[in-house]
Image (cartoon, helix red, strand yellow):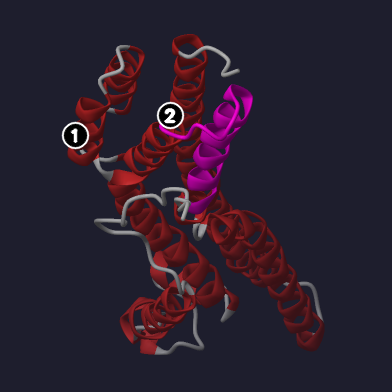
């Protein structure tokens, strides 16, 4: 009875694959942010006369006067930093133990030379997402090479399909949590604007209840409200830099995968003639 072989799956993932449930990161960052807001920024020593309701005595007191929205912005800022650290270690594991450019050059040379056992050994040494995808492609290459029931075009298509499927299995791990960082880019600015508007409303309400125009009270209210703007812009700045940095690294990895996948398919095409 004829037997059929299943397409090879990528190798089992090793190392740090990232935090799948980022909700707990947000919860922990929220707790840390509001603890910092109430106990550090809200320390009575940061206010004239030790009264939180009074005028701030330093910058931390001024930041505290920005209101509870400051806690939200601090939550977003801490979340971005934590997710950036998480992505750093996850992608470092995904990239493997060797330089990506060095691995790509060596694996292409081995594949063109038909030294697939050495190529597999190099993948085992490299590890990570790139090595997993290349290993799956090489395994499929060897399987279809021994298959006499398929035509050459079908075999090449099979190799390309295995490469694409293995790549798609790795992509969720690479892109995990980056959509959250991208969302915080916008949320940071919008939350800052919301806090600024609330601060300005409270400032003008205080002026109206005083029965006259008080320039000092107005300037103090504006400075407190703008704390939200400054902290929100800082949060968005961090989020943009972190998101673009890791997106660029993922793009480099996918380009390398495409390059190796093309080499594997081309090598089969060059080294084999059409079966009749």
The picture quadrant where one finds residue 14 is bottom left
Q: Which residue is mark 2?
A: 145
| Nearer mark to the viewer, of 2 and 1 | 2
**Where residue 233 appears, x then y in whole percent?**
58, 52
* Nearer to the camera, 194 or 60: 194
Q: In this orientation, does residue 244 appear?
A: no
Check residue 272 in the rendering and tell me which mark sits there, or answer none. Answer: none
Q: Give the vertical position of 117 relative to 140 (above or below).
A: above
First reached walking from the N terminus: tag 2 or tag 1:
1
Residue 197, image quadrant: bottom right
Q: Is residue 114 one of those drawn in magenta?
A: no
Residue extending farthest to the front is 1
Q: How many marks?
A: 2
Residue 217's place in the image compared with 52, above or below, is above
What secondary structure is marked by label 1? helix
Q: Position of residue 214 (x, y in %)?
A: 72, 72
Does the magenta segment cover residue 157?
Answer: yes
Query: Helix or strand or loop: what does disc 2 sit on?
Result: helix
Identify which residue is drawn at 55% across, 75% down. Answer: 72
Give the spatial CA distance, label 2 vs label 1.
Answer: 20 Å
Residue 189 in sight from this viewpoint: yes
Crowd band around label 1 with a 10 angstrom C-alpha radius: few (<14), some (14–19), many (20+):
few
Q: Nearer the viewer, residue 53 or 240?
A: 240
Residue at image location 48% in from the left, 46% down from the top: 166
Give the residues drawn in magenta, as a range. 146-169
The answer to whether residue 109 is above or below residue 149 is: above
Position of 119 with respect to 199 (left or right) is left
Q: Residue 269, position in %: x, y? A: 52, 15
Magenta stretch prevailing secondary structure: helix
Do residues under tags 2 and 1 come within 8 Å of each other at their CB atoms?
no
Q: Which residue is mark 1?
A: 121
């Amino acid at each position: 009875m004829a037997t059929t072989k299943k397409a090879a799956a990528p190798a089992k993932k090793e190392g740090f694959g990232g935090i799948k449930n980022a909700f707990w990161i947000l919860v922990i960052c929220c707790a840390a942010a509001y603890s910092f807001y109430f106990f550090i920024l809200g320390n009575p020593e940061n206010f004239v006369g030790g009264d939180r309701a009074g005028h701030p005595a330093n910058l931390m007191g001024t930041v505290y006067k920005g209101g509870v929205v400051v806690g939200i912005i601090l939550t977003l800022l801490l979340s971005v930093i934590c997710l950036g650290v998480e992505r750093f270690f996850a992608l470092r594991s995904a990239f493997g133990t060797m330089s990506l450019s060095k691995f790509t050059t060596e694996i292409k040379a081995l594949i063109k030379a038909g030294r697939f056992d050495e190529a597999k050994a190099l993948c085992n040494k490299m590890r990570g997402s790139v090595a997993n995808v290349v290993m799956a492609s090489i395994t499929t290459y060897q399987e279809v090479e021994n298959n006499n029931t398929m035509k050459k075009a079908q075999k090449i298509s099979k190799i390309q399909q295995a490469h694409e499927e293995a790549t798609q299995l790795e992509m969720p791990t690479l892109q995990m949590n980056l959509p959250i960082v991208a969302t915080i880019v916008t949320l940071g600015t919008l939350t800052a604007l919301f806090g600024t508007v609330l601060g300005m409303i409270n400032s003008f309400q205080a002026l109206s209840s005083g029965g006259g125009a008080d320039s000092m009270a107005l300037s103090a209210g504006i400075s407190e409200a703008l704390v939200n703007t400054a902290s929100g812009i800082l949060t968005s700045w961090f989020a943009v830099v972190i998101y673009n940095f890791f997106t660029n690294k993922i793009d480099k990895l996918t380009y390398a995968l495409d390059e190796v996948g093309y080499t594997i398919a081309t090598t089969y095409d060059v080294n084999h003639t059409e079966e009749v």
